Amino acid sequence: MKLKNLTPILAVVILATTSCKKEGSSETASTPLTGSWKFISLTGKDSTVHIFRDAGTELKYEIVTDIASSNPKGLYRFSGNSITAEGVGYDYTSTITEREYENNIFQSEQIIPLSGTIATQSGSSKYKLVSADSLYLDQNMLGGTSSAPGGLNYKLEGTKLSLFVKQTHADSVIDNGVKIIEKLNTALTIVLQKQ
């Protein structure tokens, strides 16, 4: 059974930089993040697990994707309460590890190297500082399957800004009469340099 591979993590990355602009407050207060930040790197890990029963046997398929960027392009601009991505793109290398279990007994593993390019994208979103290390996003620009607002943590070290995106989601669906439990976990680190 072939399941989604890089789709969840790449969707997170693409949507993180291309969210539609949303009307909001005209607040223009300066924050520690105000200014232009060059995109330096992205690293991350995504895990997708599907569990279902077939003829009395519990089947579990796990896909773990590790990703690292190279050749980064673009800027993020923080102004007042808006984040704008301008021409953000990169090349990536990735390893996809697919594992299959029957009744929690390991059956097989397949490791697939992958590389490619995320074309440059632009977009914007509103944000709010929640604390000295957290941002709240008025709309979900983290990607994934939820449309709920979300947040991220950040760490500011001089001219280096690290954004830590974490998202989890669990759901169950019925597919051809079979209940499938799906669990998704994504963790990304985006590093920016003050310009």
Image (cartoon, rainbow, N blue to C red):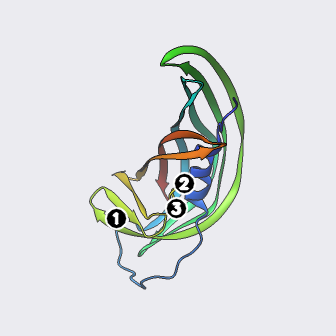
Residue under numbered circle 1: 32
Residue under numbered circle 3: 141
Residue under numbered circle 2: 145
Separation (CA) of disc 2 from disc 1: 31 Å
Percent of width and height locating residue 123: 61, 67
Closer to the camera in the image, 104 or 4: 104
Rendered position, 153 above or below 126? above
Could you say which quadrant of the image residue 135 lies in? bottom left
Q: Nearer the viewer, mark 2 or mark 3?
A: 2
Of the 4 image quadrants, the one containing the N terminus is: top right
Q: Nearer the viewer, mark 3 or mark 1?
A: 3
Image side of residue 16 versus residue 5, left or right:
left
Rendered position, 79 above or below 74? below
Contact between labelled residues 1 and 3, with CB atoms less than 8 Å apart: no
Rendered position, 2 above or below 158? above
Residue pictured at 56% horizontal, 47% vertical: 173
Residue pictured at 54% horizontal, 54% vertical: 145
